[in-house]
């Protein structure tokens, strides 16, 4: 039976237990007799082969057609470690077990397909025209910052202009210098960057706002109902304040404060068909604590019927453990060479079905600059991480898949938000609540000069200009998700067991989880593979 495009070719290969490079699938599909070429490729593969490469295809194209077709043979399915495929999880669990099925008796390999020893395999034979993937706000190759004073001025002015525009329509804004010249007792409003936050001797709060003309002090009285909002403030975020000038016009008493925020009326976009995306992060290949077994079970699950709706994989940084990231890290490394770490990660990536679209951004453990925004990887590392031709973009970036926009940000600033804000508003146990704060501020890393390293550019790539439908982060190694004004916020946990360093800072990771999002409903199911 003739194959119907690349998706059917991948389905045929996975039914025999093989993965495939995207280029290899394209080469087979473009052949005059793709079915015959596919059969010759399968026949020529050795028992040790796991991934069909372009070399395999070229060899099959040059060979004569053998007398026995692959459809007449039984081909064993296996993964990289010769284990059986993970069993199907229960129907619609909030967290499934992901336990592997018992090992077969065929030398550690799965039973032949014809015997029914393997679970049903995935069939992603969809019309490629139904898929769509677009990237925006990717600053890779567009860095202009030199570290000069003018760069810092430019990035903060851009932040104030763009976020201030979301606030000026809500209040009767006046520049700082204009407010200074107004008579006492006047009602005033100002939009500016939070320049300073300090308490007074009597327990009130003094907030200094700064705009392009200067700065002006605002006093928040301790007995006002909105004083709790002061606990949420971070320096350098953009804010609007309304109030009344003191008699001497030297200060304003705050009557209200407003954040750029997500509109409560936001209606998220959804896909037109039932399709899923897996959102993961923090794989940390190269660490002694990398959970290879959990990753293998995840990759196996993607090959089953239970995982066949997953057509997109979004990876939010820290593909590898890196080198020299924290004190005495070398004592916890399984792979000490950074390039070898990425080569090993690429082998892990090959375990993922070749017909899944992959998007990756870097994190603070990856071999890119630490200062945010982080450009995507250089060409050498891109060539190493070439399995399935992933889209590699900057941190942060916005990925729109079938109409659903996903803001991907690794999440280093979450440490700062959690450290600065009260526990009930931001904590490691509920990382999505810290993400709510970033959505409220419409900026993924508002505070400059703290733990989060920020690089000055001509424009502020960290501003959340457009409201995303999904906000995806990692970094803190904790699983959490929820909705803030209809925006789905997901922190996806990790694939690394607790390290000695994490023990020293009291981090108990949520490892081996894969949040799966239904793009047509934005519902979340968490699959557990640890």
Image: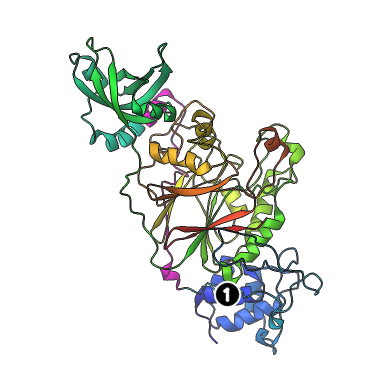
Looking at this view, is 266 or 44 the one in front? 266
- Residue 260 screen position, x and y as percent: 33, 37
> Can the viewer see residue 198 in this picture?
yes
Magenta stretch holds residue 211: no
Q: Is residue 179 above or below residue 263?
A: above
Task: Indicate the quadrant containing the N terminus: top left, top right, bottom left or bottom right.
Answer: bottom right
- Residue 101 screen position, x and y as percent: 71, 68
Magenta stretch holds residue 135: yes
Type of colouring: rainbow
Q: Residue at x 58, y 66 (%)?
A: 354
- Highlighted range, magenta: 127-156
Lateral position of residue 308 relative to residue 499, left or right? left
Q: Is residue 120 above or below residue 411?
A: below
Mark 1: secondary structure: helix
- Residue 495 screen position, x and y as percent: 65, 50
Q: Residue at x 49, y 39 (%)?
A: 434
Q: Residue at x 47, y 73 (%)?
A: 126
- Identify the residue position indicated by label 1 in the image: 11
Report the number of numbered marks.
1
Q: Residue at x 37, y 20 (%)?
A: 222
- Residue 326 screen position, x and y as percent: 67, 33
Indicate the quadrant where residue 148 lies: top left
Q: Is residue 335 above or below residue 349?
A: above
- Mark 1 Cα within 10 Å, few/some/many (few <14, many 20+)? many
Looking at this view, is 238 or 395 the one in front? 238
> Can the viewer see residue 453 in this picture?
no
Task: Indicate the quadrant containing the C terminus: top left, top right, bottom left or bottom right.
Answer: bottom right
Q: Is residue 252 above or below residue 393?
A: above
Lateral position of residue 396 relative to residue 184, left or right? right
Looking at this view, is 434 or 364 the one in front? 434
């Amino acid at each position: 039976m003739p194959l119907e495009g690349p998706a059917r070719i991948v389905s045929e290969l996975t039914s025999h237990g093989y993965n495939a490079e995207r280029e290899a699938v394209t080469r087979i599909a473009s052949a005059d007799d793709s079915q015959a070429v596919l059969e010759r490729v399968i026949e020529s593969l050795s028992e040790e082969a796991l991934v069909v490469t372009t070399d395999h295809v070229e060899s099959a194209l040059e060979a004569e057609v053998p007398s026995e077709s692959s459809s007449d043979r039984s081909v064993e399915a296996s993964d990289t470690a010769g284990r059986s495929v993970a069993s199907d999880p229960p129907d619609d669990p909030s967290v499934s077990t992901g336990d592997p099925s018992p090992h077969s008796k065929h030398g550690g390999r799965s039973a032949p397909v014809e015997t029914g020893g393997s679970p049903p395999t995935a069939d992603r034979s969809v019309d490629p025209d139904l898929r769509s993937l677009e990237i925006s706000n990717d600053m890779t190759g567009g860095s202009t910052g030199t570290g000069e004073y003018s760069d810092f001025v430019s990035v903060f002015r851009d932040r104030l202009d763009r976020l201030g525009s979301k606030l000026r329509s809500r209040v009767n804004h006046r520049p700082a210098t204009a407010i200074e010249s107004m008579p006492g007792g006047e009602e005033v409003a100002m939009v500016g960057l939070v320049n300073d936050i300090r308490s007074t001797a009597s327990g009130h709060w003094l907030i200094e706002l700064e705009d392009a003309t200067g700065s002006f002090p605002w006093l928040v009285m301790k007995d006002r109902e909105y004083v709790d909002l002061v606990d949420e403030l971070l320096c350098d975020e953009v804010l609007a304040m309304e109030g009344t000038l003191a008699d001497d016009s030297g200060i304003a008493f705050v009557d209200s404060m407003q954040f750029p925020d997500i509109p409560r009326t936001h209606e998220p976009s959804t896909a037109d068909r039932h399709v899923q995306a897996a959102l993961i992060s923090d794989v940390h290949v190269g660490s002694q604590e990398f959970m290879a077994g959990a990753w293998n079970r995840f990759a196996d699950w993607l090959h089953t019927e239970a995982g066949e709706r997953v057509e997109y994989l979004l990876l939010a940084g820290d593909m590898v453990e890196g080198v020299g990231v924290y004190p005495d890290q070398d004592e916890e490394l399984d792979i000490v060479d950074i390039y070898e770490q990425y080569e090993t990660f690429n082998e892990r990536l090959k375990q993922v079905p070749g017909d899944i679209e992959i998007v990756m951004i870097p994190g603070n453990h990856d071999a890119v600059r630490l200062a945010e925004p982080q450009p995507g990887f250089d060409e050498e590392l891109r060539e190493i991480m070439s399995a399935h031709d992933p889209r590699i973009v900057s941190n942060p970036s916005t990925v729109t898949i079938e109409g659903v926009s996903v803001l991907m940000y690794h999440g280093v600033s979450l440490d700062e938000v959690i450290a600065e804000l009260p526990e009930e508003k931001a904590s490691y146990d509920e990382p999505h609540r810290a993400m709510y704060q970033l959505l409220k501020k419409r900026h993924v890393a508002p505070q400059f000069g703290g733990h989060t390293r920020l690089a000055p550019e001509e424009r502020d790539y960290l501003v959340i200009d457009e409201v995303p439908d999904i906000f995806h982060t990692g970094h803190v190694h904790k699983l959490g998700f929820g909705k803030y004004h209809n925006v789905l916020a997901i922190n996806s946990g990790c694939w690394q067991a607790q390290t000695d360093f994490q023990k020293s800072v009291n981090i108990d990771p949520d490892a081996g989880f894969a949040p799966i999002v239904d793009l047509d409903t934005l519902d979340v199911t968490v699959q557990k593979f640890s």
